[in-house]
Image: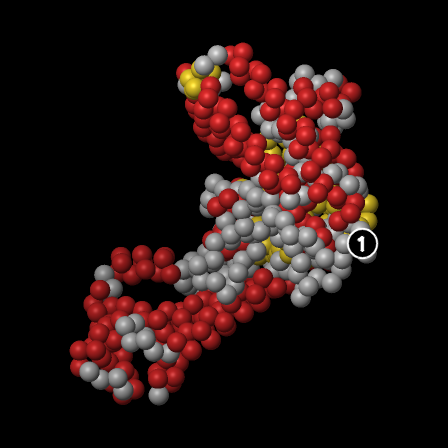
Amino acid sequence: SNDEALQVLNQLVQNKCITLDQIHEVRNKQSINGNNTTNTITNTITNTITNTNKNNHTKTSNPKKKKMNKKKKAKSTVQYMTRHVAFKFHYDGATYNGLAQNMNCPNDNSVEKVLFEALEKTCLIDKGEEKVQQQQQLQIVDVMDEGQGLNDDKNYNNNVEANQNNINNRRGCKYSRSGRTDKGVSAFGQVIALKVRSAFPVGAMILKNTVADVNNDSSQIKTKSDEYINNDEMALMKESDLPKNELDKVSCWIQQKKKNNPCNNDENDEKREKDLNHTVGTTPTTNTLVRRTMTEKSFCQMLNNVLPATIRMIGWSPVSDEFSARFSTSSRTYRYFFIKRDLNLNKIQKALDYMIGRHDFRNLCKMNCEEVDNFVRVINYAKVVVTKEDRCHITESCQDRIDSINDNDKLDYRAKCYFEIRGQAFLWHQIRCIASVLFMVGKNLESPTVIQELLDIEANPAKPSYPFAPELPLVLHQCNYNNVKFGHSVENLWRISCDLEDKWEELTLAGERLRNGIQSLKSDAIVATPDVVNFINAKRSERKKKMAKNKILTMMIDELSHEEADIKDLIDKKGSHLSWG
């Protein structure tokens, strides 16, 4: 049957008896002859394997080529220790569909997918034997079904099994993430944790009751430098003995690599086993363990060398087996950036003050009742901040917060600001919902007390309808942990800083070009006064109609009438033509 034939093909590919190109030849021969039986498949495969073996025998008759093939096929059999590590990294969410990988989507464009591809490429985690075999099987099925439209159910089942292997592989390395950001949302302090491969081989030995000073070299550790050390004085290296960062040095004893000596292999193995069972030598010889002063891998630089420029690993820290990047987080800080324009920052700050504390935020998030039944969250800190370059004219006593209407009026129309909200955990789209309501408050469309009303679930049990704020200005700024300090490499930070500076310079120059265009319109464009009057009247009437629908805003219509009169008086004084500026 076809199932049996596919199983045979899968075994042949795994044993490297045939390749996918040879399977293509089989399929082509079937389509030419019009046969699709199991016997035809088996006979064609047998003939192909026989011809391939003859060709390989002829091609590898040159001894030099044989040596080259042996070198390419040689694989390291050294096994390395693994350790639980937390990584801090940043990414630009504008180019991704979110942090979490969608296992059921073949065209998934997530940060996690790119991260795991980089981890596998740098051999920091194992790809997994099951995963490799599953991919080979999927390729075989695709080749055999090419142009025939068969076995769609089998392809679906195989995809499901492959996704399950991906999930099992992540569970095996104890993967966890701090915050799950959605499409378009960026992060500068995102944290993940998983088990990665260390630079220290399995079986490395260290001295008992000896703690190596990381600032000292190996010669300063008290050992019997000229004599053999008894096996009782040595202990196997554990994960807790590994260096805490890539700069710390640790002296250990590792097994010397075997030399390629085809003669007397049995005798050498017996001597090596005897030496390992009885003595450990401090002098590098072929029959003993050798002393090495080693450092840990530069995990961040290794990953940054293969990651795209939109993702950068910042630092790492060793963590315990019980650590979870999600559940061990003490607090998370989000920032939402915006331009001041005509927003009233004082009212926005008053609205933020109502959020501090423990509240039910079901009216300020996207409801997901299937997975979440508790909408109570704690906000520890919430404020509106003006960037340093735009608050140079504000008094020193209120550089961070905007506490008075006078300070709000002094700010430039294009001042760059952001909300900063800190809490232990957040709901789905909670920050974007909060930002949307805060913008309504800043535009005087709602009162700051609207936050207080939305948090009162008894008075407002149903969430009102309002749009989400855009996702691109939102950033997961920081994830804090107790007793976890991330180590940073100077060279790695220098590279990241250069990348960010280059990107900032590119976007800043683009912004200045746009600003130049705005200034040109203001200085050069001239418009007719009647056209200005008609435009203002149309916009005012449109705004009045919108306000009339809201009972709260009807009181503002009279204020608009007074503003219209003032604008008309000002236009009459200017003459028949006005500068756009």
Classify residue 7 as left or right of residue 95: left
In the depicted view, which residue is nearer to us: 476 or 461?
Answer: 461
- On screen, residue 272 above or below 208: below
Q: Give x and y (percent) for residue 334.
A: 67, 42
Residue at 41%, 74% (x, y): give it: 155
Relative to residue 319, is residue 9 drawn left or right? left
Q: Position of residue 355 (x, y in %)?
A: 77, 43
Residue name at image x 47 percent, y 57 percent = 108
What is the count of numbered marks? 1
| Mark 1 Cα shell of 10 Å, populated few (<14), some (14-19), many (≥20) | few
- Residue 364, compared with residue 28, is above or below; it is above
Residue behind mark 1:
459
**Residue occupying the point 42% across, 17% down:** 526
The N terminus - image quarter: bottom left
Residue 348's x, y, as percent? 71, 35
Q: Amino acid at mark 1?
A: Ala
State whether residue 237 appears in this view. Answer: no
